[in-house]
């Protein structure tokens, strides 16, 4: 990765950390979009995976820990791999579809984790159903946030590649 590309990606990373601290509706955060973005942008799998998880870790040091943290981090890790599968299909449609699919995946995994924690819902089918029903309003915000921040990250990076050609990497650039 060249110097200009590293700077551009670093700016987006810092923006994601900063945005987690701003007041926002529940689940309307940049992390899912960042996970998709890092999966597309980084050739190195470890770097792609580390980016959203480090952003989460740094911000969680200040925002606090919870008993479903492994489910949350695991869901974001899977979203990185979804992003990697989009590397050769970086279009608005594929990114939007990936954002919606990733949000649904996050919803399924994290609310299963809430149910498994046993602190809010009984360990029954009814308890699992109640956990998912209670989380539906959060899913709406997750989808909207992921789509919004995906547009911001992918759009800003696409513009940066056009304005500063040295950011572009062979076979790693974003297509319009």
Image (tube, helix red, strand yellow):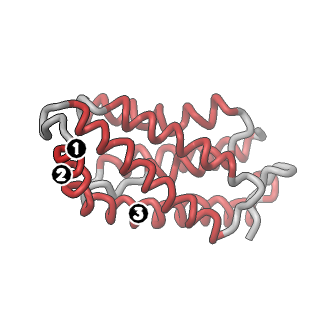
Disc 2 + disc 1, Cβ < 8 Å: no
Residue at image point 67% right, 66% down: 159
The N terminus - image quarter: top right
Q: Between tags 2 and 3, which lies in front?
A: 2
Which-is-in-front pick, marks 1 and 3? Answer: 1
> Can residue 23 be seen at all in this image of the molecule?
no
What label does residue 130 carry, if any? 2
Residue 43 seen from this side: yes
The one of 21 and 147 positioned closer to us in this rendering: 147
Give the residue displayed 79% in from the left and 54% down from the top.
168
Q: Is residue 8 above or below residue 175?
A: above
Front-most of 78 and 50? 78
27 relative to 154 in the view: left or right: left
**Tag 1 residue:** 125
Residue depicted at x 41% and y 48%: 106
Circle 3 sits in a helix, a strand or a loop, which is it? Answer: helix
Sequence-first disc among 1 and 3: 1
Give percent across and percent down for residue 98.
Answer: 57, 59
Q: Residue furthest front?
A: 125
Q: Residue at x 24, y 38 (%)?
A: 114
Residue 150 appears left or right of 60: right
Give the number of the disc on residue 37. none
Q: Which residue is mark 3?
A: 143
Residue 72 screen position, x and y as percent? 37, 38
Give above or below for 93 relative to 4: below
Say which label, 2 or 3, has the lower sequence index: 2
Hey, which quadrant is residue 24 in on the image? bottom left
Disc 1 element: helix
């Amino acid at each position: 990765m060249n110097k200009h590309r590293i700077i551009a990606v670093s700016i987006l990373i810092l923006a994601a950390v900063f945005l987690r601290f701003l007041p926002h509706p529940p689940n309307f955060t940049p992390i899912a979009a960042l996970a998709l973005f890092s999966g597309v942008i980084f050739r190195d799998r470890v770097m792609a995976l580390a980016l959203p998880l480090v952003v989460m870790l740094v911000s969680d040091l200040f925002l606090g820990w919870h008993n479903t943290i492994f489910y949350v981090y695991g869901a974001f890790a899977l979203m990185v791999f979804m992003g990697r599968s989009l590397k050769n299909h970086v279009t608005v449609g594929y990114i939007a579809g990936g954002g919606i699919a990733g949000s649904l995946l996050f919803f399924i995994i994290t609310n299963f984790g809430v149910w498994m924690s046993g602190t809010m819902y009984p360990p029954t089918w009814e308890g699992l159903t109640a956990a998912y029903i209670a989380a539906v309003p959060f899913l709406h915000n997750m989808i909207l946030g992921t789509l919004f921040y995906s547009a911001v990250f992918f759009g800003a990076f696409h513009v940066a590649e056009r304005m500063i050609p040295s950011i572009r990497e062979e076979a790693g650039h974003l297509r319009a």
